Image (tube, rainbow, N blue to C red):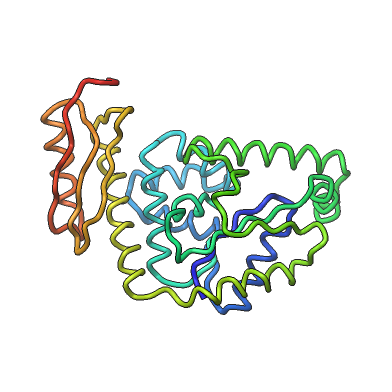
Amino acid sequence: MAIVTISRQVGSMGDEIADQVCRDLGIRLVGGDHFQAKAQECDDDFAKECRAFETEEPAGFFERIFMRHPANTSLFASLVYSEAAQGDAVVLGRGSQIVLAEDPAVLKVRIVSPRHVRVERLAQRKGISSDDAATYLNRHDRHRRALIESIFHKDLSDWSLYDMVLNTKDLSADLVAKLICLAAETEGPISQEQKASYADRALAKAVEAAIKKKVVTVPVREVEVTSQGNGRLSLDGAVQDDDSRKHAGDIALAHPGVTAVDNQLRVTKLGI
């Protein structure tokens, strides 16, 4: 077993496949509703934003949250790493394949299908006309591409982001799920060492988000927080003055779980 991220086009049967993979492997499904619930536990400001949009569809909710507060890209990455730290799971969408892109222990899957097939499936599933289904699909695809590009500056159609790209035009959801399970089972379970590494990265990204929310940073060299293990963090990037540099270090050191901070932030007016 492993951690599996599944990115899917609407109408490609990605949701059904993710559910089947979870049942076959006996592991957790981490989807949009779960992330939204977790987001509301992060801090008071973020919880208020979440409650304000709790009636939104997941895509609208996340787009508005991230557009209002760019620091929440770091916070969302922290949520993904926190879920990975809990062990084997299927993480559905939300750019998780990008957050976990450099980790070979994660199986990154993309589920696709030709447009006309997706339109037909949507029309049947929702009981709507083909024209309405096509309009819905176009809007959803455009929205999802823009969301991922604005948050992560990546293109969903970049196949280098994935280990497997599976076309469900002529393949059943059950068969595709079996293929994913076969690949996942070759990875073996997530080790305690890997879980600890994910937890370290979750802490680093949570601190990064806290700094970005309170300190004015330099866009051309944004603050980046990395973990050295055992609660030790390193701060890199640029801020506008010495007070901001000190403030960032104080925020990091005061964060629960942090034991030491190596503040390598530079002071520069560039980009201010």
Is residue 102 rendered to the left or right of residue 128? Answer: left
User: Which residue does the image show at 42% across and 65% down from the upper left?
Assistant: 84
- Measured as percent of width and height from the top left, residue 234 is found at 20, 48
In the image, taking residue 241 as reference, residue 191 lies left or right, namely right
Front in this rendered view, residue 129 or 73: 73
Q: Is residue 13 above or below residue 139?
A: below
- Vertical placement of residue 192 versus 143, above or below: below
| Residue 150 placement (x, y as % from top left) | 50, 35
Residue depicted at x 76% and y 52% = 113
47 left or right of 247 in image: right
Closer-to-camera residue (43/24)? 24
Q: Give x and y (percent) for residue 225.
A: 26, 47
Residue 195 position within the rendered picture, expressed as x and y whole percent measured from the top left:
35, 69
Relative to 188, 197 lies left or right: left
Residue at 18% x, 37% y: name it: 265
Q: Which corner quadrant holds the C terminus?
A: top left
The part of the image, by quadrant, that contains residue 105 is bottom left
Looking at the rendered structure, the number of numbered marks drawn on it comes to 0
Question: Which residue is found at the position 26% from the left and 31% from the top?
Answer: 217
